[in-house]
Structure formats: C-alpha cells, structure tokens
Amino acid sequence: MDSLKVYIVDTHDESFTENREALSRMLSPYRRAKLERFASAGTEAAAARRANNYDLCLAAGLVTDIGLKAYGLNERDMKYGTAAGGKPIFINHPEIRFNISHAGHYAVAAFSDEYEPGIDIEDCRRISNRIIFGIFGEEERRLIMEAPDEATRMQMFGRIWTVREAFVKSTGLGLATPRDAYGTVMKNGRLAITQRVCEGEFGTRELSPIGDYCISVVAGKNINFERQARG
C-alpha cells in the first residue's frame, strides 16, 4: 500500500486553536455549510458539544486540504459526491480516492490514486461487551478474551473495531454490510480482513497508536462504485 498516504490534524494544536476563522475561510462551500450547523449557540452543554463538533468538522476539512496538496489541489475547489453506501468522492477529481474519520480531538484522512481507502480512528480506552458478543465473531472474541490484562484487552478491541469500520468504509457499503459477512483474523501478528461481502482485494494497515487512539486503514482494489453528485 505504498501509494496510500495518511494525514492527521490535531484540534488541540496551537496553530489550529489560534486560527479557526482564518482556516475555515480556506475551505469549500460544502465544508463551510457543514461548519455553520455547529456555529449557533444554545445551552452551555449543547454549546460545548457543538464547539467540539465544529472543531472536528473543521479539522476534517483541513486534513482533506493537506492530502490534496500532494496532487497540487485545494479542498476549496472540490465538488463532493457520494458513491454507494454514502462513501465520499470528488466529482471533479474521481481519480483521487479518499476517506476521513475523526474522534476525540483528531481528524485523519487516507488518500490514494490506486486503492479505495477506508480509515477509522477510535478511543482505545473503551470496550463494549454489546459489540464483542453481539457483532464480533468467535476469533475476534478469543483475541480479546485471551489478552493478558485490561489495557491490552481494550487495545485489542480498538484494533479490531477500527479495522472492521475501515473495511466497510473501503467497500462503500457502510452500515448496509451484513455484520456476520466479514471480520478480522490475526496473521503473523497483524490483523487481516476475512470477508464474503464483495469481490475485490483488501489490504490492512494498522498505524501506530496516537496516545489512546487506534487508527486502521483498509485499502481495496477492483471495487466498482455507483457515483452520484452531491453539494
């Protein structure tokens, strides 16, 4: 997956917090319209949530802009569209494949002109028995339960969850993907996708954790998407 690049923006970075307004003016009408949804005031708690959502939405636009710089392009010039399952695409540059995720105070993006990327970032300090026993397969449950301590169990949960989420984002099928039709297995110390969802070749890359956050990328080849314009 050498032709796949990953970029990260941290909303706690000083250059971000001190330049929100200027940074927002760099972005596309599509992204600015999304930002406006989080700009209105309300109760203190609601305002705090909106402020965090605003920062993550802004960071998503910025990390997209950073990724596009490698192609000599800017996010503000992009016309967005959706493929099957809601996968975002660039209508005016369909040769560039990308995907975005955000959690906590990080936004991440994967770009490629060869693969269909899916990326996911999650807080690895959380674990859900509902997901473990209601969604994960037997092999995935075993990997978690055999971990030597709680911290390792939480990290394994986060690793599996991000790989699974990145896979469905790569396929473009999203939540329509049957949960029992795909999963992860451990191969040579690395998680790999096993699936009977669609034709195609899928590679998995787990990035080094950032603090308490796990990041995984799944890149697919030979997948066809129905594309439609949006915004």
Image: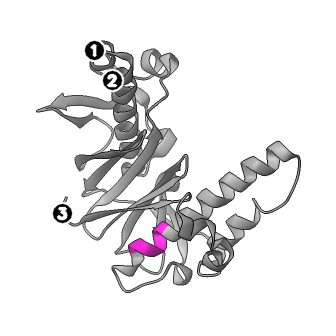
Secondary structure beneath dot 3 equals loop
- Tell me if I can see residue 141 in this picture: yes
Residue at 24% x, 50% y: name it.
Answer: 200
Quadrant showing the C terminus: bottom right
Label 2 is placed on what type of residue? Thr
- Locate the N terminus by quadrant: bottom left
Q: Amino acid at mark 3?
A: Asp
Judged left or right of residue 95, residue 99 is right
Q: Main secondary structure of the magenta part?
A: helix
Please state the horizontal and vertical placement of residue 71, each as a whole percent of the image.
34, 82
* Residue at left offset 62%, top offset 65%: 17
At label 1, counting other C-alpha atoms closer than 10 Å, the crowd grade (few under 14, some 14-19, many 20 or more) is few
Residues under numbered marks 3 and 2 in contact, where contact means CB atoms less than 8 Å apart: no
CA separation in Å, label 3 and label 2: 29 Å
Circle number at residue 148: 1
Report which residue position mark 3 lands on.
Answer: 2
* Magenta span includes 104: no
Query: Which region is colored magenta?
Result: 63-67
Decide which of 92, 199 is in the foreground and name it: 92
| Callouts 2 and 1 close, C-beta under 8 Å | yes
Neighbor class of circle 2 (other Cα within 10 Å; few <14, some 14-19, many 20+) is some
Relative to 111, is 161 above or below?
A: above
Quick one: 125 or 185, which is closer to the camera?
125
Relative side of 15 to 161, left or right: right
Question: Which residue in the structure is indicated by mark 2?
Answer: 152
Quadrant in the rendering for residue 181 = top left
Q: Amino acid at mark 1?
A: Pro
Q: Residue at x 41, y 43 (%)?
A: 211
Disc 2 to disc 1, C-alpha distance: 7 Å
Between label 3 and label 2, give the one nearer the viewer.
2
